[in-house]
Structure formats: C-alpha cells, structure tokens
Amino acid sequence: MSGWHSSKLKEVFDRLRTERIGLRQKEAEVRLLKYGANEIQVGKKISPFRIFAEQFKSLLVIILIMAAIVSYLIGIFPGQEARVVDSLLILSIVLANGIFGFLQNYKAEKSIEALRRLVTPRAKVIRDGLVQEVASRNVVKGDIVLIEEGDEVPADARLIESKDLTIDES
C-alpha cells in the first residue's frame, strides 16, 4: 500500500478496519487498551537537584569557577590576601546566578505541569454512527474525527473530505 495520503479511501478503511459510520464503541475501547492513549510520552521528571546542578554546566560558569579557584590559591601566599576576597566574590556571584536560574527553571517546570493537568483537549469522533465528544487522549487508530474551524487536530490523521480547507501551521 502506498502512503496513507494517496491511498484510496476504501483501502484506508479496510486497513484500519473502520468505516464511514466510525468505530463501534466497544472496538474503540479495545483499541485504546491495545495501542494505549493518544498522548505524547513525557520524559522522566527532572529532580530539583538536577535543575540546580545544570545551572553550573555552561562554559562561562566553569571558567569563572576555575578563576575563583586560581584566585583563592594565589591568595594563600603572603601579600595576596585580597585574592581570597576576589575568589569569594566570584563564587558568590556564580552561586547567586545558579540560584536565580534554578528558581526560574523550577517555576517554569511547575507551570508547564499545572497547564498540562488543567488542559484536557477534546475531539469530536463518530462512533456507532453518532458524533461524540471524547478526550483527545481517547482518540484511537481508525476513529473518524470531525474537525471544524478553530479546532486543533488531535492526532495524525488522513482527510476523508473537506470544504474550503486552509491550514495554519504556525
């Protein structure tokens, strides 16, 4: 079979074991169990410690830490005590920068998490010959999805028919 986009509609329906009246509700439930939810897999959560540690990985920060160490070692010698103060000042600035970066990234992670929990996109599908609204995560392979102006496409899909279709991918 050639690509989904260029296949005849009957071939697509046969391959997906579906029809114009959509899947039967029972079949959709079976497919949801078999193939899993229609959602992007989220990677492992990053621990707060790791977020903090990543603030010190840039080349500039490493150079500043090395400069602080060298300055401290020079400050050990008599007459060079001011270098110890310089090294502590450099380290305190690097640490403050790390703390601010950590707070910003940590808050951003928490905000994204909260938004993800808050937003549950919906999709209109045809099942048992009727239009139903389901959570986008419950759209399964073979569902007939109805898309109207302003809707987001809830999954990879092949168009069956359209009228005055325009797409904005921005």
Image (cartoon, rainbow, N blue to C red):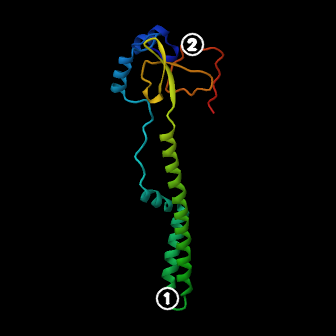
Q: Secondary structure at mark 2?
A: loop
Label 1 crowd (10 A; few <14 / some 14-19 / many >=20): few
Instruction: Name the residue at the top extreme.
Output: 10
Compared across the picture, whether 46 is left or right of 121 comes to left
Image height of 112 relative to 151, above or below: below
Q: Secondary structure at mark 1?
A: loop
Give the CA distance from mark 2 to mark 1: 81 Å
For image coordinates 49% across by 10% down, the residue present is 9
Q: Quadrant of the N terminus?
A: top left
Q: Earlier in the sequence, mark 2 or mark 1?
A: 1
Question: Mark 2: which amino acid?
Answer: Glu
Q: Quadrant of the C terminus?
A: top right
Q: Nearer the viewer, residue 87 or 130?
A: 130
Q: Nearer the viewer, residue 78 or 165?
A: 165
Q: Which label is found at residue 161?
A: 2
Q: Which label is found at residue 145?
A: none
Q: Nearer the viewer, residue 21 or 38?
A: 21
For image coordinates 47% across by 60% down, the residue present is 52
Question: Mark 1: which amino acid?
Answer: Phe
For image coordinates 51% across by 37% down, the residue present is 119
For image coordinates 33% across by 25% down, the residue present is 34
Residue, disc 1: 77
Residue 113: x %, y % from top left: 48, 45
Image height of 50 relative to 35, above or below: below
Residue 100: x %, y % from top left: 55, 62
